[in-house]
Amino acid sequence: MASNSSGGGSSDRQGIAQQRLRIIAGHLRGPVDGDSTILAAECKAQGSNTDVSSEGKTVPRRRQEIMKWNGWGYSDSRFLFNKKGQAEFTGKRYRLSGMIIPGLKDWFEGTFGANLQHKTPPTPLLTNTAVPPATLNEAFVEEVKSTGIPFSHDAEDRVFRAHGHCLHEIFALREGKIGRVPDMVVWPSCHNDVVKIVQLACKHNVCLMPYGGGTSVSSALECPPEETRSIVSLDTSQMNRILWIDEKNLTAHVEAGIVGQDLERLLNESGYCTGHEPDSMEFSSLGGWVATRASGMKKNIYGNIEDLVVHIKMVTPQGVIEKSCQGPRMSTGPDIHHFIMGSEGTLGVVTEVTMKIRPMPEYQKYGSVVFPNFEQGVACLREVAKQRCAPASIRLMDNEQFKFGHALKPQVSSIFTSFLDGLKKFYITKFKGFDPNHLCVATLLFEGNREKVLQHEKQVYDIAAKFGGLAAGEDNGQRGYMLTFVIAYLRDLGMDYYVIGESFETSVPWDRVLDICRNVKARIIRECKDKGVQFPPLSTCRVTQTYDAGACVYFYFAFNYRGLSDPVHVYEQVEHAAREEILANGGSLSHHHGVGKLRKEWMRDTISNVGMGMLKSVKDYVDPNNIFGNRNLL
Amino acid sequence: MTDTYKDSGRAGLEDVDEFVDILEERRRSSDLGYAFRTFNPQPYKGAPSCSTADLNKAVLESQYLSYMAKEIAMETGSSVEEVREEVCGILEEMSQNLQLGFIRMMAYTLSKVFKRLFTSILVNMEGLNMLQQAVQESPVILMPNHRSYMDFLAISYILFTYDIPVPVIAAGIPLAGMKMVGEILRRSGAFFIRRAIGSDKLYWAVLSEYVKTIVRRGFAPVEFYVEGLRSRTLKSLLPKLGMMHMVLEPFFKGEVYDITLVPISISYDRVLEESLLAHELLGVPKPKESTTGLLKATKVLQENYGSMHVNFGRPLSVRQLCHGKINRCQFNLVPRDLPQQPSAEAQACVSWLAHLMVRIQEEGLLISPWSLMACMLLQAPTTVLTEEGLLWHQLTEKTLWLRKLALDFGARLNWPGQVPDSDVISSTVALHCSVVQRKAGRVYLVQENEPLRKCPISPEDGVIRMAAPLLMLASYRNQSMHVFVRPAMLATAIRVTESTQRDELFSFFCFLQDVFSNEFIFIPGKSPQDFEEACVLLKKCGAVNFSQQEVMVLDAGSEVLSFLQALLQPFIDSYQVMFRYLCEEGVHVLSEKQFLPAVRNLATELILSGELCTYEALSSDMQKNVLSALRRLEAVTKLRASEQNEYRVNKAAVRRIGDILSRKIPPQMLQTTPDARL
């Protein structure tokens, strides 16, 4: 995963040994405050830095300084086709950085019918004249100024917070088209700052939209065009400290603006982790996870966000909501955390969260299994779930994704490696008789102590063997996970060459997994044809999580839009149809992306009239004046 | 929605010249070589062929059947093993055993038989090409109409000829009972379904799982007759919905992406079983299907039966057809393997689709000159046909007039183009010499002569003897009824109501549809469109003019209107006779067994007294339809406790329907319940 691979070239085993050493050293040194196991920090005053870890944080106030304003991720990291027509990944941050990916061009051209001659470069710079002028609520601005909380109404700052990463949002930015954007950005640096801002917003009837990592893919960050009040984007990125770590109860109290990679890195320094690793963890924030009911890749060991959270503090227009104790489970009526989790910024701002932490795993091992076809692969995952022996992560890619993953293999340095690859390929396709157009691969990640990992690994491979699965090495497994974080960068590359696409997810009972995969993929292909897409689309899926009663399925869909006058509209129509197909096949509206504004229309059918009424009445009580007016969810 | 499909269903098949005679090749080259040629069809997604054993195993081990077995064991108090054994028994009785060797044998034999019986077997190539494509894309359901035993393997024969996977075919269990033949059919892909399954839960369960498994696997098309039975009257029958539910369920539940329905219209110039059918309708029991019976019937092989047309309709996507008609989310909350009562929405959707398919079958039929002549012959008084004879030139003239009307109404005619019309008519009459004869410029009905009988025939027997050829004629007329029935109902409404007001005509039109929807196929909920169509067609042939409010009869339209009224009259008269019987007799409860002969006697009496002009009231088919219609209209109720189909008659309600039909009282909304035949 991202955090691991950003470590650079050291092998896993070495890396883990080093981490282990660090943990031990940490224990020897003892905590900062003498014999206390609790590390505490007060709300920092402007400019001072007294939190647990003093290392530099990833997210600056002016995010555009290190991140793309019209694409995914860091400005220095991107895919491009070099002068020789070879794909390479720039920068130094990732394992793939600086590498040539020889297979990508052929795959790209072959899959999409794209051509490197046909480019669609983005508008390079944001023209400030394209940004609508800010409607400021002067009284509000004055009072914010007096609190000393930093704010801005600079066009770049505002545009950056006007979008998530839905295709239509990024496409519009690339074209230089800017719609309604927040009128002002504020950067609170602690809970009390947020309390002040919310009070002022209520007082002056200003619309607040909480902004965490900005990785939403549900149109949740889009400003409602009908909003006439001044819209203030509340950027939580400066609330990014671990306030204390409780080693006796294994919990950490963290400010909600911290992004995933910082949280893990800082905890790792103390020998801990949360184990919560959503694919977006480099950029997404703790508050965002809570607000959307996020799910992490390693949920099989650590649980999803709802399992990880012990205590939440949220500031609402009615005041602060929180529980009075940190009991691990309570029977005190409906769990108020469940009003907060998934509220998508409609009720308030999550400011602080107490989360479970775990000692860092001693040992990690990747793995992969090749199956003769997707059906067998799903059957294997189902069996693994049935026996409740799923590794930290187990993901099954279909044949198209297997090929895609293959195309992303970096240039191999030695003839020996390529010879081995050839041999492996020969063994699987010729000797074992797997059809290269049907086989699919499951990637695995084991974690724990070494002995248990090896034992666990054997158990899983034994089950896989029953379904015709062949172990296919650690390398393939690791590359599979690498795909997870570079895929978002790849979309930007596609958009340079007339290819647009996106992923969406669902959760579905086990017995419907195969049917939903087949039907949704077929629907995408059919809809593209009907909507006049000139080239066959990429329509592929993978099973990314297993549960006792079902699985999470991801669909990837991309196509070459040459010849279409309104490609985004076509894209949206196809995605809409695909979602209808998902629902008709017994899939859920969302497993972890949330509803936002993109999927609102299906909420009533999803949770029933009464369910809608319940949520509405909560909203009406908590936020009667719709201060948190992003209009998500309901 | 429907209309667009009807139109597009037609569009590709407009060109009648596309038909190719597949026997021509057979007459030129070796049948043996043909039967043994390489057969390499491309099934759905290259689905691997599925052996009988695999298929039966999959069915047997399905979660659905194990659940049902447990449930039934619990209900009946027997052990699960016993129930499972019963399941095995049912499966064994049911299952097909498709084998290429037998297909080849069948291909060889049928080549011989077909060449002897038919001048030509004409198949539309475009339809076949589309089918070939469709078979590779999703599971295909072949839905032919059923007019003759000859239908049975004809489709398989054609598909074999054109390298398309041969279907597995739903057949009635009596066929399985025939020595040898049953086994041959089984190996040619037939699977056998019991008649009158009724409430046998276990049987339903096995059958539906069997059918659904075949659809899900998609290794071969499924062929079944949506009409359920062979039509005795050559008229389309109301669709049966049981099989339709089974084949559609895999789509509703998302187990397949789509299912393709292919309506197939088979038309015969002359039906092999014509006389058999007429006698069956008159109450002479149908001979039991047996191999010896089949051999005895070989004498029918001596005669010529003209041409057979097989028209493969445009493949229809169930996904597209059902769009907006069914919310598939309704299956989300119960495991799909468990039995689930279909919702009202699902039932309505399936019923609509089944009716639509029958309508498309009808539209794909080719109307023969003989069917047009039958319409005309039946409008002549019986005495003219039997004694005086109908003038030849008069028949020719009227038939040609009707040809024009049929073309105006959009019918597909099978009228040879290069031959003078008079030759067409005389060769048609020659082909049907079992029904009519031409003598000295006149046409006479052929009456059965039974020389063995010595004693003089009673008048009642005379009626029955006369009835046989008349019912045959009626059946051939029925082949084109679907072309005329909507305008005919409007024409009747115009005459009966004597009104020009559109709403008044429409309400009577709807009433007629209500009463006669067991006779003719109307798509549920489509009355306004049917009415509109009737208006447009009558306007097109110059009979009426219409506006938003009014339908005005034109002077030039009297011939068309009186022809159309007369076309529907036998149905109205016959229904009235039966209503009259039900109202007059002292009985309040009657069984079907009593009803049929009693009505036949009454009708015979009325025919002898000259009060009733049509012999069609003697047809058991129409008699049963009246009962069904009255049940549907809730004028007759079936007694639940009764074992032998006993009915209670609500005389007032029956009388009211009769009175509306004869315009003694205006039509009010008749209480109809949605069809729930499963």
Image (cartoon, grey):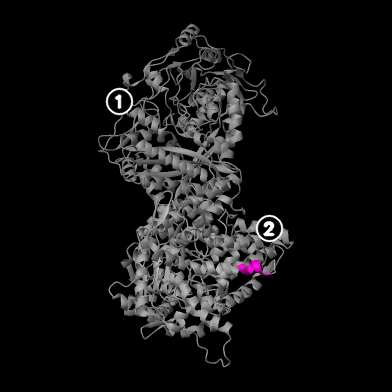
On the image, numbered disc 2 is attached to which residue? Answer: B70
- Identified by mark 1, the residue type is Pro
Decide: is A442 above or below A158. below
From where the camera sits, is residue A356 visible?
no
Judging from the image, mark 1 belongs to the subunit labelled A
The residue nearer to you, when weighing A277 against B537, is B537
Range covered by the magenta-colored residues: B580-585
In the picture, the disc for residue A124 is: 1
Residue at point 45%, 56% (across, down): B530
Whether the residues at callouts 2 and 1 have beta carbons within 8 Å, the answer is: no
Is disc 2 in the same subunit as disc 1?
no
Q: What's the distance in space between the residues labelled 2 and 1, CA to CA? A: 68 Å
Name the spot of residue A365 as percent of width and height, x first: 51, 38
SS assignment for the magenta stretch, majority? helix
Residue at point 41%, 55% (across, down): B552
Name the spot of residue B27 as percent of width and height, x first: 33, 79
Say left or right for A184 vs A455. left
Residue at point 66%, 29% (across, down): A334
Say left or right for A132 vs B257. left
Decide: is A10 above or below B258. above
- Does the segment drawn in magenta span residue B622? no
Number of residues whose C-alpha sits closer than 10 Å to that of mark 1, classed few (under 14), some (14–19) or many (20 or more) = few
The residue nearer to you, when weighing B229 against A259, is B229
- Identified by mark 2, the residue type is Lys
